[in-house]
Amino acid sequence: MKTARLTESAAPGKDPGKDPGKDNAPLLEVRDLSVTYRTGRAASWRRPDTPVVDRVSFDIRPGETLGLVGESGSGKSTIGRTILRLIDPVSGTITFDGREVTAFGRSTPLSYRRDVQAVFQDPASSLNPRHIVRDAITGPLRRHGRGSRREREEAAAEAFHMVGLNPALLTRYPLELSGGQRQRVAIARAIALRPRLVICDEAVSALDVSTQSQIVNLLADLQESTGVSFLFITHDLRLVRHISQRVAVLQHGRLVEFADTEQLFRTTQQPYTRRLLAAIPATDPEGREHRRARRAAHRKAPGTT
């Protein structure tokens, strides 16, 4: 399915067409994943362990974007970090391209680190302020044994072209760039290794609306040109509708809905999802009237308060 271009005033929707990953085996499979945070010694009124993710299952196909949505504290980022092996699950399995990730043990193969990359919310915290931004891209290439120094610098320039940045900016320091430019650098670093899956954890939430649109369109273009898959973690369903082919909805660490994007937006009967949809801000008068009607219908629906 071709992902729609996102503009500030355009009505949401996707171009019709067949999902290219529909008939493919999943690239990533998450089955019954549970994650618990240790909170230290328990007081009489508090449990020693806090469950954050509870038996969550989903999959991502090659060349697909899966939107993972929910309110703050729902467990979205925890799932992303568990896939990246930054957090260990207490139960469940993660399988990537037929390999069980949860069976890797304490040492993660470099091939998995290369194939699964991440873009986080705040690029300023993940870019070394003492190094020029070229180092942020050539460093991982060197770690994975990619080419000579000159070849790595050429690869960095190519990655900058792919994300719409002038290679002249490669010698700048992160603080000399705007927030949108720094996020493009973070994306360039992620795609320079030609990964198969990129986890975008609230990758645009810290940006203004116009820059969000540009970054979302950039991700769609990169997917079309490289075939990379995305796990797009966000609380903003407006963005999810434009970039994702399918959506997984989390509430308090549990998966409450998993559906094709358009199906979810048009026919969902899940009360929590309906509340999330009703919270999407409308940018045009007609959209605001539609939103008011939808909120009124939600308040009248059985089982709502």
Image (spheres, rainbow, N blue to C red):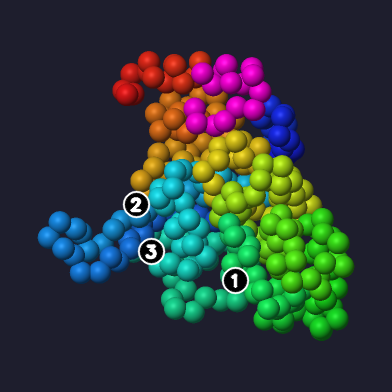
Secondary element at tag 1? helix
Please give the residue where the numbered disc 1 appears in the rendered image: 113
Image quadrant where residue 175 sits:
bottom right
Secondary element at tag 3? loop
Give the side of residue 208 with respect to residue 85, left or right: right
Q: Nearer the viewer, residue 202 or 128?
A: 128
Instruction: Identify the mark nearer the N-term, 2 or 3.
Output: 2
Find out whether residue 279 is within the magenta segment. yes
Q: Looking at the image, which residue sits at the far front?
A: 176
Q: Which residues are magenta?
A: 278-292
Q: Nearer the viewer, residue 136 or 66?
A: 136
Q: Looking at the image, which residue sits at the far left?
A: 44
Residue drawn 20% across and 69% down? 41
Residue drawn 73% across and 35% down? 7
Please give the residue where the numbered disc 3 appears in the rendered image: 89
Query: Where is 127 relative to 253, above or below?
Result: below
Instruction: Identify the mark nearer the N-term, 3 or 1.
Output: 3
Q: Is residue 194 visible?
A: no
Image spot of residue 268 (x, y percent) = 47, 27
Please give the residue where the numbered disc 2 appears in the rendered image: 54
Quadrant of the frame with the C terminus: top left
